[in-house]
Amino acid sequence: MATDWAASALDWWEEAGVDTIVGEQPRDWLKPQSAAAPARAGAAQEALPADPEAFRTWLLASDAFPAGPRVGPSGDPAAGLMMLIDMPGQDDARAGTLLSGDLGAMFDRMLGTMKRDRASIYLASVLPVWSPTGRLPKDDVARLAEIARHHIGLAAPRALLLFGDECAKALLGLPMTAARGRPHSLETPAGPILTFVTMSLPFLLNQPERRRDAMADLKLLTEELEP
């Protein structure tokens, strides 16, 4: 269908790091930008729980995030491998679990190639609520990244895998295309965490020909985790 083709094309450009549409009207790109809107009321000052269980409870109740059904992390926080997506999907919000439906089935197959399953990883999202825009709120990205780094530090995995452009930009300051193919060191309150980046799962679901590239990313990660 034409709509499927259009959605696929938009996904491709998003994964390539294109996030600004240039219109026909001229724009003064050198003009100073107005100050960013302040962070969500109370979010910047709110202390983050230092206890892992208390933090996961906080994720589901804090007013630091937009309104909507919350979807918390899953799996084993002590697994040694943490995986992070940008946010739950709309289906996830209904199911109450991250990566449900066809997306989840593909994800489970990917884990199988690593000889893992959901019980042997720790899966979380930067934003615990689905956003209709499909993007992290621009005004809140810095705070969301701070919360995510705190979360990662509490889990203290041996390695972290980031899915997609939104996660890579928020946590590493790099587009996904520039961050793939090599390890990174992500600073957290608990110290640096070995970090890898691959393409987003919705993109891979719509672009099956790119899954081979994602498998190369997983192979790189697996090799680093080998004793």
Image (cartoon, rainbow, N blue to C red):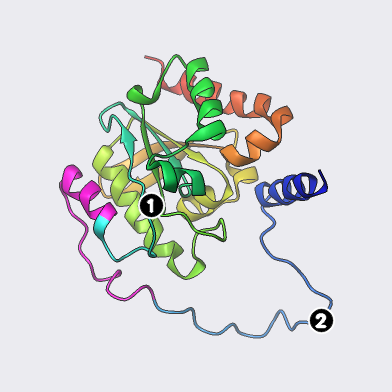
18 to 91, vertically: above or below: below
Q: What residue type is labelled 1?
A: Pro
At horizontal 49% and vertical 44% (from top left) the residue drawn is 91
158 to 73, vertically: above or below: above
Q: Quadrant of residue 203?
A: top right
Provide the residue designation for mark 1: 128
Task: Say which element carries label 2.
Answer: loop
Q: Earlier in the sequence, mark 2 or mark 1?
A: 2
Point out the image quarter for the C terminus: top left
> In the rendered structure, does residue 57 fall within the stretch colored magenta?
yes
Q: What are the residue bounds of the magenta stretch?
A: 39-60
Give coordinates of residue 18: x percent, y percent: 70, 56
On the rendered structure, is 212 left or right of 55? right
> In the rendered structure, does residue 47 fall within the stretch colored magenta?
yes
Give coordinates of residue 3: x percent, y percent: 77, 49
On the rendered structure, is 183 left or right of 78? right
